[in-house]
Amino acid sequence: MVIEGVELRAAAPTDPEVLALTAAQQAELAGMYGEDQPLVELHPDISFTVLSLDGTAAGCVGLQPVAAELGEIKRMYVAPSARGWGLSRLLLDAVESQARSGGLTTLRLETGQKQVEAIALYTNHGYRPTPPYPPFENSAASTCFAKDL
């Protein structure tokens, strides 16, 4: 899928656009689930992809290595003003391609049960429900998915 004005670029977790997008995501999630939701720390080897729309950062996704052939999708987010254009599918395609290039054969992710659009996206993209994994195994609000690449 090609969308006019969209650019993808690699970024570090300390990139100012990544920090701004993930802060916006955490604020949105706090409003949805409550302020007391713990922020899960990111692995130091995480790599991000930033999606810009007409020069403005509009979304991001992180890929965190877990094991030799297993990766985890982290902090996938599209700003509310940029939703409905298929940008989340572009980000998901990009992170899957990055995972394959890095030799990963399986991706997993966690999302909240109230995030019905995200659940639909993952399900439509071939992700299947999987038992919760640490640190989400005791979280009633979490839903976990996995996909063999």
Image: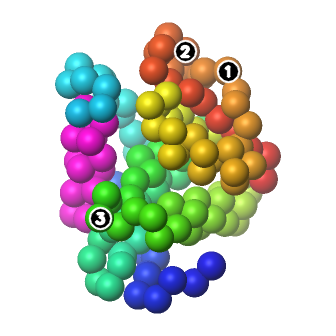
Residue 131 marker: 1
Q: Are the residues at dot 3 and dot 1 in contact (C-beta closer than 8 Å)?
A: no
The amino acid marked with disc number 2 is Glu
**Residue matched to label 2:** 137
Residue position for label 3: 81
Q: Nearer the viewer, residue 68 or 52?
A: 52
Q: Nearer the viewer, residue 148 or 47?
A: 148
What is the x, y in percent for residue 18?
30, 59
**In this figure, what is the number of numbered marks?**
3
Residue span colored magenta: 14-30
Identify the element where label 3 is drawn: helix
Labels 1 and 2: the sequence-earlier one: 1
Q: Earlier in the sequence, mark 3 or mark 1?
A: 3
Q: Are marks 1 and 2 in contact (CB under 8 Å)?
A: yes
Which quadrant does the N terminus fall into? Answer: bottom right
Q: Specify whether 85 is left or right of 126.
A: left
Three-letter code, disc 1 = Pro
Residue at (70%, 27%) from the top-left corner?
130
Overall secondary structure of the magenta section? helix
* Label 2 element class: loop
Q: Is label 3 or label 1 in front?
A: 3
